[in-house]
Image (cartoon, grey):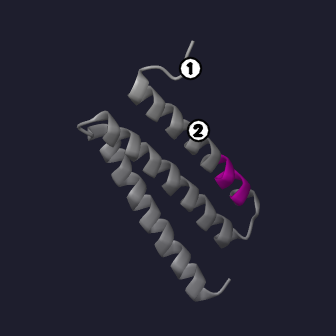
Amino acid sequence: MNQILLMAANFALGCFVTGMVLAVYRLCTGPAMADRVLALDTMYINGMLILLTLGLRFNSALYFDIALLICIFGFVGSVAMAKFLLRGEVIEP
């Protein structure tokens, strides 16, 4: 791997981990439930980006498949949480 690309991947990983730490802080101390939901969405996105960066760094396609699963579960979880916040229930009788 090119040395500049390796340094860029390390810098990107550091930025994404910093974003993840800040999202965990917001998840724990958010004043409203909507802030906590947005922090959880940010954690999904940062986790996906960390896996994509690791996939580029280690040249492995397995990381990309796992990142796709995180995207799918993150979207479904976000929709379920939004529906719960609006209506108070996820599955309607």
Report the front residue among 11 and 67.
67
At horizontal 26% and vertical 36% (from top left) the residue drawn is 32
At horizontal 73% and vertical 70% (from top left) the residue drawn is 59
Which of label 2 and label 1 is nearer to you? 1
Question: Relative to 35, is 15 on the left or the right?
Answer: right
Report crowding for label 2: few under 14, some 14 to 19, many 20 or more residues within 10 A (C-alpha). Answer: few
Residue 74, position as x, y percentages in the image: 56, 44
Number of numbered discs overlaid on the protein picture: 2
- Quadrant for the N terminus, please: bottom right
* Marks 2 & 1, CB-CB < 8 Å contact: no
Report crowding for label 1: few under 14, some 14 to 19, many 20 or more residues within 10 A (C-alpha). Answer: few
Q: Amino acid at mark 1?
A: Ile
- Helix, strand or loop for disc 1: loop
Return the disc, 2 or 1, that comes first in the chain's sequence.
2
**Where 33 sits versus 60, above or below?**
above
Residue 71, position as x, y percentages in the image: 61, 50
At horizontal 33% and vertical 38% (from top left) the residue drawn is 34
Principal secondary structure, stretch drawn in magenta:
helix
Q: Which residue is mark 1?
A: 91
In the orientation shown, which residue stands out farthest toward the left?
Answer: 31
- Helix, strand or loop for disc 2: helix
- Quadrant for the C terminus, please: top right
Q: CA distance from mark 2 to mark 1?
A: 13 Å
Question: Relative to 75, is 36 on the left or the right?
Answer: left
**Where 11 sits versus 20, above or below?**
below
In the orientation shown, which residue stands out farthest toward the right?
Answer: 61
Q: Which residue is mark 2?
A: 76
At horizontal 55% and vertical 61% (from top left) the residue drawn is 49
Q: Which residues are magenta?
A: 64-69
Residue 22, position as x, y percentages in the image: 34, 53
Report the front residue among 17 and 75.
75
